[in-house]
Image (spheres, rainbow, N blue to C red):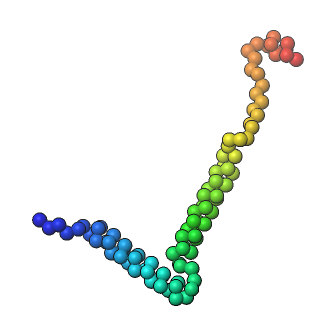
Amino acid sequence: MSRRPTWRVRLAAAASFVDHLLCHADSLICAWLDIRPLRNTLADAAAWLGRTWRTHLHRAHVRKYGPGRGVIAVVINRPTHNSEKERARER
């Protein structure tokens, strides 16, 4: 019986190895050019994109359903009467 890893495990290992090499190359290039590493810039861009996306989702929700809690909503209902006498007495 063969104990070789599955193709998914081998693919994940290969992707991890390529990622590791890219991170080292990025570090070397950034040290050589004296600039900020690209992976930090991309992480900041991803964080900004996530914040922007959540903000726009919140705005769309508020536009559709209103601001929600914290807003005092007053609903005025007219009382319902069963008989004509009660309506006449009210006038």
Q: Residue at x 40, y 80 (%)?
A: 21
Task: Give coordinates of residue 82: x percent, y percent.
Answer: 73, 15
Q: Which one is nearer the viewer's eye here, 78 or 82? A: 78
* Residue farthest toward the top in the current orientation of the protein: 85
The answer to whether 44 appears left or right of 79 in the picture is left
Task: Give coordinates of residue 62: x percent, y percent.
Answer: 67, 50
Task: Give coordinates of residue 13: x percent, y percent.
Answer: 32, 72
Residue 80 against residue 4 in the figure, above or below: above
Residue 46, quarter of the rendered image:
bottom right
* Residue farthest toward the left in the current orientation of the protein: 1
Task: Give coordinates of residue 27: x percent, y percent.
Answer: 48, 81
Q: Which one is nearer the viewer's eye here, 91 or 54? A: 54
Instruction: Indicate the quadrant containing the N terminus: top left, top right, bottom left or bottom right.
Output: bottom left
* Residue farthest toward the right in the current orientation of the protein: 91
Residue 12, quarter of the rendered image:
bottom left
The answer to whether 43 appears left or right of 7 in the picture is right
Instruction: Indicate the quadrant containing the C terminus: top left, top right, bottom left or bottom right.
Output: top right
Q: Which one is nearer the viewer's eye here, 21 or 65? A: 21
Q: Residue at x 37, y 73 (%)?
A: 16
Residue 19, quarter of the rendered image:
bottom left
Q: Residue at x 82, y 16 (%)?
A: 87
